[in-house]
Image: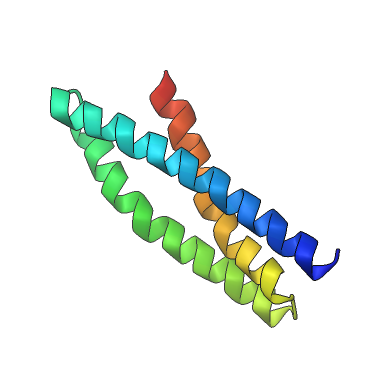
Amino acid sequence: MNMMAAWMKVASSYNMMTLSAAEVIARRTMMMASGAMTGPEAMGMVMEKATIFATATERAAVAAASGADPARITSAALRPYSVKTQSNVRKLRR
């Protein structure tokens, strides 16, 4: 894959992740404002940040150590965030 296409794919993935994150933030804010957020949901909301950061860092390091180009390293780091935001959106839409 040429570099321009690789970076366009990264940008597209990043945009989808940010849209999902915005929806999650809006839904969780409404839950907090209405008193509908449970204790486990609040704790999970806080704890998921550190877990995803560690996973993303590990995946980027493995990609870099494997000799991946910068776009693939970025993609490897972004993937855990994208997966988690999509998971949160599906869960919160129910």
Judge whether 14 appears above or below 21 on screen.
below
Of 68 and 1, nearer the camera is 1
Residue 31: percent from the left, percent from the top?
Answer: 23, 27
Residue displayed at 50% across by 52% down? 81
**Res 37 seen here:** no
Residue displayed at 54% across by 53% down? 80
The answer to whether 24 appears left or right of 79 in the picture is left
**Res 87 seen here:** yes
Judge whether 53 appears above or below 88 on screen.
below
The answer to whether 68 appears left or right of 24 in the picture is right
Residue 4: percent from the left, percent from the top?
Answer: 77, 65
* Direction right: furthest residue: 1
To which quarter of the image does residue 42 belong? top left
The answer to whether 89 appears left or right of 83 in the picture is left
The answer to whether 15 appears left or right of 50 in the picture is right
Judge whether 85 appears above or below 68 on screen.
above
Residue 71: percent from the left, percent from the top?
Answer: 69, 69
Residue displayed at 31% across by 34% down? 26
To which quarter of the image does residue 34 belong? top left
Of 24 and 62, nearer the camera is 24
On the rendered image, what quadrant is the N terminus found in?
bottom right
Residue 21: percent from the left, percent from the top?
Answer: 42, 43
